[in-house]
Amino acid sequence: MNQTIDFQVVDNIIEELGCKPSAIIGILQGIQEHYRYLPKEVFPYLAKRLGISEARIYSVATFYENFSLEPKGKFVIKICDGTACHVRKSIPILEKLREELGLSENKKTTDDLGFTVETVSCLGACGLAPVLTVNDKVYPAMTVDKVSELLKNLREEM
């Protein structure tokens, strides 16, 4: 699961956004967009380049829910468990996803880094409940029966 970090990629992001502490959020977003998470190896490098402490960078990375310190899969599936989705049976859909992918509440990403399954409080599509997204593409009116077909189609894209 270890990925080699290309610091040239990090440098390009820094150059594009500016080598200054105020650019840290944008820099972290760029790094996460490239790697799909924030590798721990970038923290000391960024601290040295930007002239700020690793602790400050880490505090920014952990404050915002959108940042991840764990590797994520090629396909990030977010299933809504807000009220509208929950009452329309989002939990059985979540359980089916986990079952088919060999995941659990504690293990969110497949070993091959193909899939990550996360629950979210709301996806803002309550009228389409139950809903899930795959890399931000919305799949409305999801059912347990549709899960296998969705995963089959996604596996074909890998």
Image (cartoon, rainbow, N blue to C red):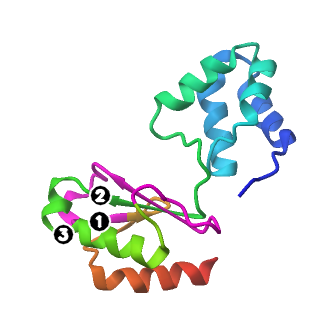
Q: Which amino acid type is shown beneath numbered disc 1?
A: Val
109 within the magenta span: yes
Q: Is residue 157 above or below residue 61?
A: below
Residue 39 within the magenta-colored segment of the rendering: no
Q: Callout 1: few (<14), some (14-19), or many (20+) C-alpha neighbours within 10 Å? A: many
Disc marking residue 80: 2
Which mark sits nearer the N-terminus, 3 or 1? 3
Q: Amino acid at mark 3?
A: Lys
Q: Secondary structure at mark 3?
A: loop
Give the residue number, with chain letter if any, for mark 3: 89
Residue sitting at 21 percent across and 53 percent down? Answer: 82
The answer to whether residue 148 is left or right of residue 153 is left
Q: Amino acid at mark 2?
A: Cys
Q: Name above or below for residue 39 compared with residue 111.
A: above
**Circle 2: element type:** strand
Q: Which residues lie in the magenta part?
A: 105-132
